[in-house]
Amino acid sequence: MNKGKTFTRRTMLKGTAIAGAAMAAPTVFTRGAWAQDFRNDPGDSSTVTLGFNVPQTGPYAEEGKDELRAYQLAVKHLNGEGDGGLLNTMKPLSLKGNGILGKKVEYVTGDTQTKSDAARASAKRMIERDGVVMVTGGSSSGVAVAVQSLCQEMGVIFMAGLTHANDTTGKDRRRYGFRHFFNAHMSAAALGPVLEAEMGKERRSYMLTADYNWGWSVEGSMTEVTEKIGWETVNQVRTPLGAGDFSQYITPVLDSGADVLVLIHYGKDMVDSLTQAVQFGLRDKQVNGKDFQVVVPLYSRLMAQGAGKNVAGIYGSTNWHWSLQDEGTQAFVKSFGQEYGFPPSQAAHTCYVQALLYANAVEATGTFYPVEVIKFLEGFEFDGMGNGPTLYRAEDHQCFKPVLVVKGNENPTSQFDLLEVVNEVPTEQITYPHDLYAGDLGPYEV
Amino acid sequence: MDALLLQLLNGLDKGAAYALIALGLTLVFGTLGVVNFAHGALFMLGAFVAVSVNELLTFSKRVKDESVTFFDAYKEQPYLEIWLGDFGSAIIDWSVPIAILAAIPIMLLIGLAMERGLIRHFYKRSHAEQILVTFGLAIVIGEIVKATFGANPIPQSAPEIVSGAAPVGALFGLSEALVYPWWRLVYLFSSLAIIGGVFAFLQFTTYGMVVRAGMADRETVGLLGINIERRFTIVFGIAAIVAGVAGVMYTPILPPDYNLGMNFLVLSFVVVVVGGMGSLPGAVAAGFLLGVVQSFASMGAVKEIVPGIDQIIIYLIAVAILLTRPRGLLGRKGVME
């Protein structure tokens, strides 16, 4: 036997130690120096991928489709195609219309199915398989909260689309999650004075609530505000999401002695329940000597379109509406309208703005490193995006800007003129302390 | 009192849908001995006959919308309105009743094709295999509809004349406030008429008598020289029509999507089991019973005592009835045992 060539335990151990040291060496020397070893770093690639995770099926599918249209338009504008949209009006602006940091923007899409587990699976796939640097989308607070915490765990920024529950930037706020859309608290604060002026102090309300975090949130905020005016809450009934036929929940309203129905449904559910409420004659009813009223705290043009003439005269609130006259709104509506032949919904608007805000933050900081991007967005003040001066509050990642109180238009002048803006409620009136809904953002580094 | 009456009407409405589907299921089971899991798909296909008829009637031309100045907007103007004016609009308004007429021959053809093309090959197989093949068929039909019409519900509206609420209270000398949507009343009474029609057909016609005889003793009827198989095929076609027409009429109440059949199928099986396998009156009675119970369970006062009861009440009742009457309400000895 040739002793010299025997592979002993000792040489084996030495070899392992050297190999181990060699493998560890690059990170030992570079990790601290660059501090930018982050997930899905596009590096030298000439493209960067964003993940658009929207409901393409389920009760919020119509909103989801419009969100996707907005994202596709945003990608066009970021890459310097089309008329540039809000890139022409946004202030301050770092974007140059040549992609993000010179990289062409590409995207992948996913279907959340309006279900938290499907949304998480879809977001995870985007992050792990498609290598996206940012996930964005909606439209359900259940989904937003679930995806937001996944993104926090995985160290990828989540720019929430349409999500209206207080939880998203309240108890479930996350360092990696940002919300441009308004929330239930702001809706109630904006609606309160208008409801008091239009319907008086003595009303009895009946609430039908979508049974998940968004519904509970709006129910809580609306109850607080209406009871402060002097209204009495007759009943609060929770209904399953996507029930389709709400008639068995509407019939008890007729005989409850209530004279206001607060319909805390969204998307297709709202179209179904409002249509059924009107079929049951609620709008023509007189109770306690007053006209029966319906309030839809979160309104949208898409829903108004679905419910047709049933929305006439019904009050609610929105984050934004295409008929606003400011420069940003007009630029966006023109751009979106030319592309698709109809005006954008509020869901489309918030999603488009979120995509631009993320891209702008990356461009301004000069890196895709999420920690730097987060620090830039925290406390960021901007204008020219359709809502007037807006602040991204650092403490809870919630945007603060005026809120619109709207009413179903009784005399529409065009097929899209379905909602009439009754009041543009100033930011001061809807602002609340960041610790009103206690939550913890979590760490920057994950 | 008014609330209870409304809830009762509402429950009868829901029950009518369950009863119509369960009736067809029981007919097929009683005659052909097949547990047809594709029966819900027939209800859904009926609903999509309504969608197709509506799309056909509203086939549109794109015209520029001058009222929008921000950008180039377009409106869809149906050709029927362009050619026939108000009469065209009226035809479109009546698309659901027109779809009911269209659904009768279409559903008959679909039913016959389904029975002759697939299901008859499985008569001699075990129930498990029949369930597998019909369930598979239901999935295939659902996916075809999804691929053709998309995954989202497509709302249909009842004719303008029956789209409002009927002053039920005033009609019966009760409270003025008591109203109920016209279309739901139309739906309820039409369902009762269809159920009555099916029973009358079986009870008072020679054809029906032979079918009933075949249900009781297939072999003897065959020995008498009657082609009972052909009659049973027709019965399958009738069951398909009943499910399809129920589907069409349900569209103004609930916008249909490809999954509609599955949602109703599960409930309908519960209805059949509660009513008693193979018993037609049992299926109808259980359909209405469960509809009404589900409706009452959704009342605020009830939900306050047991939260979420509206979601599970039907299954609770099924458990209770099967524990006390294992053959179901009107089930006979020797059927499916």
Image (spheres, coloured by chain):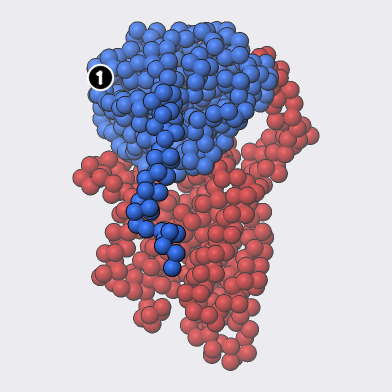
Answer left or right for A231 relative to B24: left
Residue B328 at x, y percent in the picture: 34, 70
- Residue A385 point in image, percent of width and height: 52, 13
Q: Is residue B42 above or below residue A374?
A: below
- Which quarter of the rendered picture does the N terminus of chain A lie within? bottom left
Residue B123 visible? The answer is yes
- Across and down, in percent, residue A372 comes to 42, 19
Which quadrant of the view contains residue B54? top right
Q: Residue at x 39, y 63 (%)?
A: B270
Estimate the x, y position of residue A15 in percent, counting from the top left.
40, 49
* Chain letter for the part of the structure drawn in red: B
Residue on which the image places disc 1:
A436
- Quadrant in the picture for residue B333: bottom left
Residue at 59% across, 66% down:
B238
Q: Secondary structure at mark 1?
A: loop
| Amino acid residing under circle 1 | Leu
Q: Residue at x 61, y 52 (%)?
A: B145
